[in-house]
Image (spheres, helix red, strand yellow):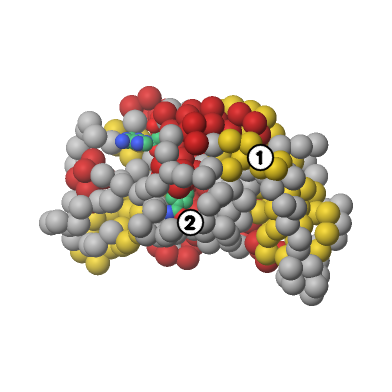
Amino acid sequence: MRAIVFDRYGGPEVLHETEVRDPAAASGQLLLRIVAAAVNPADYKWRSGMFATLVPITFPHVLGYDVAGVVTAVGEGVTGFAPGDRVAGLLNPISKGGYAELVTMEAASAARIPKQLDFATAAAVPCACLTGTQIVEEMLRPRAGQTMLLTGATGSVGVAALVAARRCGTKVIAAVRRRHVARARELGADDTVVLGEEDWRRGTFDQVLDTVGGPSVAKRCLHVRPGARICTAATEPIDPTGLPAVPEFVAVHPDGSRLAGLLDDVAAGHIPIRIAHRFPLTRAAEAQRLVERGGLEGKVVLDVGR
Ligand SMILES: NC(=O)c1ccc[n+]([C@@H]2O[C@H](COP(=O)([O-])OP(=O)(O)OC[C@H]3O[C@@H](n4cnc5c(N)ncnc54)[C@H](OP(=O)(O)O)[C@@H]3O)[C@@H](O)[C@H]2O)c1
């Protein structure tokens, strides 16, 4: 099969197309013909070597967490999926493999794509929506009447977190760039604060869900009440000095049944998904450049096959 690989850490230019051996579904796995794969911020971070000392990877390496495609074979013991099914999933974040024509994935990580959704939209869902939702529902578990600070609330992770938090009855304060204030309100934020500009003087937070990190978020975290939880998905750390709670880093994990619910929410219009750009697989380097530059207000998706 054709795949986009890299053999050493570096800039987008290290990505190149090559022929690699077709994978085969092991026990409990699906073999998927990929139709669309999303590009996530993590992709350029892995490529640049940001995680090299933390999690060494083997080369040549195929990036890509998020895939949507068609099942072509199922491994031993798989129930609930059959060849021809349209599925999406979050791949194992260490082994990855989405920038390719075929991939194997655990059946437990996959979910059927509702018929109303196209492959590109479905590919945009797993990593971002699972991250936002898992932090709300598995870590912070907010209650009605509480107040949550959500940074980067109009980003891909932020939008899913906002929907999940609002479902819990939590008041959400969106901390966003000035140009995203109106969008945050439109998405259901109860109040907004401009990150890095305004100060927050209207009360305390019971939880912080962060997708940005760094000093501007640390400053906002001074307003959490003692005993509150600060959970961050961001790779830029929040300096804990002087904060009433120590920030906890949270990593997304595959979860097919939760993903099925999220895809249904997207199909029903409860979670808005914006696709900012689409590229053919062969232009993965260009796609990563755009994601790294930021300011996209939507996902970048690679069209892999039909
Ligand atoms: N831990 C995990 O398992 C996990 C999983 C998924 C994502 N992540 C990480 O979470 C972060 C967000 O991911 P994403 O997919 O949601 O990215 P995204 O769609 O690009 O959203 C990020 C949002 O944060 C905003 N933002 C960035 N820097 C900001 C700043 N200094 N002040 C105010 N707003 C700022 C962005 O605005 P602009 O677009 O205008 O810059 C955008 O609205 C990334 O660092 C990603 O690597 C971690």
The answer to whether 129 appears left or right of 101 in the picture is left
Q: Residue at x 86, y 57 (%)?
A: 83
The answer to whether 112 appears left or right of 169 in the picture is right
The answer to the question of whether label 2 and label 1 lie on touching residues, with beta carbons closer than 8 A, is no
Direction left: furthest residue: 242
Q: How far across and how far down the image is residue 29, in percent?
A: 73, 65
The answer to whether 228 appears left or right of 25 in the picture is left
* Closer-to-camera residue (10/170): 10
Q: Residue at x 76, y 37 (%)?
A: 305
Amino acid carrying label 2: it is: Ile
Residue 215 in sight from this viewpoint: yes
Residue 113 in sight from this viewpoint: no
Rendered image: mark on residue 57: 2
Amino acid carrying label 1: it is: Thr
Q: Residues within 10 Å of mark 1 (few under 14, many from 20)?
A: few
Q: What is the spatial separation of the Cα atoms under label 2 and label 1, in whole angstroms?
A: 18 Å
Q: Residue at x 32, y 61 (%)?
A: 248
SS for tag 2?
A: loop
Find residue 158 and report its image quarter: top left
Q: Residue at x 62, y 51 (%)?
A: 97
Q: How far across and how far down the image is residue 50, in percent?
A: 37, 48
Question: Who comes first in sequence, dot 2 or dot 1?
Answer: 1
The residue that mark 1 highlights is 18
Q: Work out whether 226 lies above or below 262.
A: below
Q: Quadrant of ligand 1?
A: top left
